[in-house]
């Protein structure tokens, strides 16, 4: 005897298959929408905000030799700066994977780069760094003497504290690739005078910071590019 087929059983199987197909389609649509939402968040995070809180300057000396002595002009600088970074995002964390801090004067780097420690910054969190910046007899352009003397006569010099590095965005358990971050913080250093010898036959000219160890409270907003 042949087995009798049940039409109601076939209808139940078809309905079950249709429900599985519909659930798969809906799940796929939800997954696509979730991916689009995450991509929208990742591609549009708010960049961190940097502030240069203060700077303690221990040395800022420019020396140049006379024309008869072919020795390069040098600038020696030592300072400690306090930088703060604020993450304004409410759902996005920030990994600082590599940050180098250095000082610059009129477009020329005047200190070695100081690397900041790798850190993670949570939602709306604040991170504080206080690195030392050193530049011992750094060769600089001879054209810096005149503008530096002008700055000295004006009572101060504008130094830029710069940060160059990489960041990653974190949403939940997902971490993005690395993005380049560039920060530029202006710092106005005050002079109180200095010794200069410009007489004929002088062997050297110097511009010195008259008050070493001077701590300047700046609270200066920085320009940030990501």
Image (cartoon, rainbow, N blue to C red):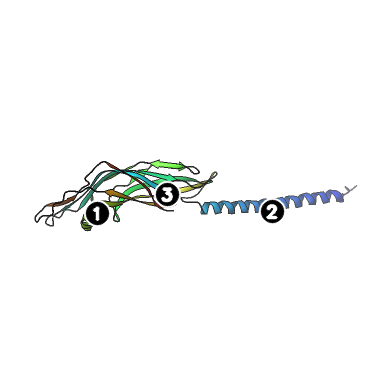
Question: Which of pointers 2 and 3 indicates the residue nearer the eye?
Answer: 3
How far apart are labels 2 and 3 at the CA level?
39 Å
Q: What element carries label 3?
A: strand
Task: Rate crowding at label 1 as few (under 14), some (14 to 19) or many (20 or more) other CA atoms within 10 Å.
Answer: few
Mark 3, residue position: 166
- The reply, left or right, for residue 4 in relation to residue 107 is right
Q: What element carries label 2?
A: helix
Mark 1, residue position: 154
- The reply, left or right, for residue 5 in relation to residue 218 is right
Where is residue 215? Give x, y as percent: 30, 42
Asked whether the beta carbons under mark 1 and mark 2 sit within 8 Å of each other, the answer is: no
Q: Which of 179 and 163 is in front in this view?
A: 163
Question: Which of pointers 1 and 2 indicates the residue nearer the eye?
Answer: 1
Where is residue 52? Give x, y as percent: 37, 46
Q: Which of 8 and 52 is in front in this view?
A: 52
Where is residue 198? Give x, y as percent: 13, 54
At 69% from the left edge and 52% from the top edge, which residue is drawn? 26
- The reply, left or right, for residue 222 in relation to residue 37 is left
Mark 2, residue position: 25
Q: Say whether residue 8 is visible.
A: yes
How far apart are labels 1 and 2 at the CA level?
72 Å
């Amino acid at each position: 005897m042949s087995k009798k087929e049940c039409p109601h059983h076939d209808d139940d199987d078809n309905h079950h298959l249709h429900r599985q197909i519909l659930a798969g389609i809906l799940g796929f649509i939800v997954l696509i929408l979730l991916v689009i939402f995450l991509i929208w968040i990742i591609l549009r995070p708010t960049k961190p905000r940097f502030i240069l809180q203060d700077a303690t300057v221990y040395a800022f000396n420019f020396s140049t030799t006379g024309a008869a002595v072919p020795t390069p002009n040098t600038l020696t600088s030592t300072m400690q700066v306090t930088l703060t970074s604020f993450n304004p995002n409410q759902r996005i964390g920030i990994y600082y994977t590599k940050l180098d801090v250095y000082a610059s004067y009129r477009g020329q780097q005047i200190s070695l780069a100081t690397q900041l420690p790798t850190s993670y910054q949570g939602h709306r969190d604040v991170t504080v760094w206080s690195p030392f910046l050193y530049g011992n007899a750094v060769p600089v352009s001879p054209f810096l003497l005149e503008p530096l003397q002008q700055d000295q006569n004006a009572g101060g010099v504008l130094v830029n504290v710069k940060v160059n590095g990489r960041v990653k965005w974190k949403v939940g358990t997902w971490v993005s690739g690395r993005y380049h971050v560039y920060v530029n913080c202006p710092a106005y250093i005050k002079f109180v005078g200095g010794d200069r010898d410009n007489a004929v036959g002088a062997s050297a000219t110097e511009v010195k910071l008259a008050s070493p160890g001077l701590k300047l409270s700046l609270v200066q907003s920085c320009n940030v590019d990501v």
